[in-house]
Amino acid sequence: MSNQEVCAQLHKLSPEVEVVALVGPSGELDAYVGPADVESLIGPMITPLLTLADRAGQELGRGTLNLLISEGSRGQVIAQDLGGGRALALIVRPGAALGLLLDDLRAAADQLNRLAA
């Protein structure tokens, strides 16, 4: 199974998931499923968010970043750190069952890490 297939599978699990992106260390997309108008934005936006959240967590004594959830009035942005500067990011509509979605996100992250090994 490829990175793209893992992301496509995660995208299909919930109708509330609008975007699934595997973001590389420099903000490049290693896999992407979602509307074309968001594709060029997600990598350059997720990378600095994760960097800032990781720094805040370390400086506040919370350790290294594992998961970032940003909730807005029109949904959430969720990013799971995969190590090595990579992250799996989701853009989710309001009303998603976040508990189930986080379980699916972690399973996909494990699969992507096995593929990268």
Image (spheres, grey):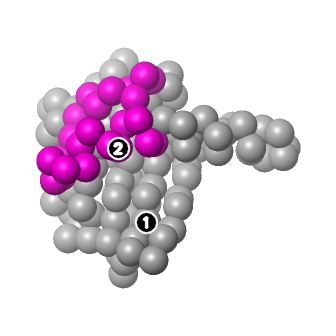
Q: Quadrant of residue 86?
A: top left
Specify whether residue 30 is painted magenta.
Answer: yes
Dot 1 corresponds to which residue? 76
**Mark 2 Cα-neighbour bin, 10 Å: few <14, some 14–19, many ≥20:** many
> Regarding mark 2 in the picture, which secondary structure is present there?
helix
Instruction: Identify whether 19 is placed above or below 32.
Output: below
Left or right side of 3 for 92:
right
Quick check: can you spot residue 115?
yes
Q: Position of residue 35 (x, y in %)?
A: 16, 53
Q: Dots 2 and 1: beta carbons under 8 Å?
A: no
Q: Nearer the viewer, mark 2 or mark 1?
A: 2
Residue located 15% across and 32% down the image: 1
> Regarding mark 1 in the picture, which secondary structure is present there?
strand
Left or right side of 48 for 41:
left
Q: Position of residue 112 (x, y in %)?
A: 32, 33
Q: Earlier in the sequence, mark 2 or mark 1?
A: 2
Residue located 40% across and 71% down the image: 75
Specify whether residue 42 is painted magenta.
Answer: yes
Task: Name the mark on residue 108.
Answer: none
Give, as a three-letter code, the residue at label 1.
Gln
| Region in magenta | 24-46
Instruction: Identify whether 21 is placed above or below 82.
Output: below
Quick check: can you spot residue 99?
no
Give, as a three-letter code, the residue at label 2.
Ile
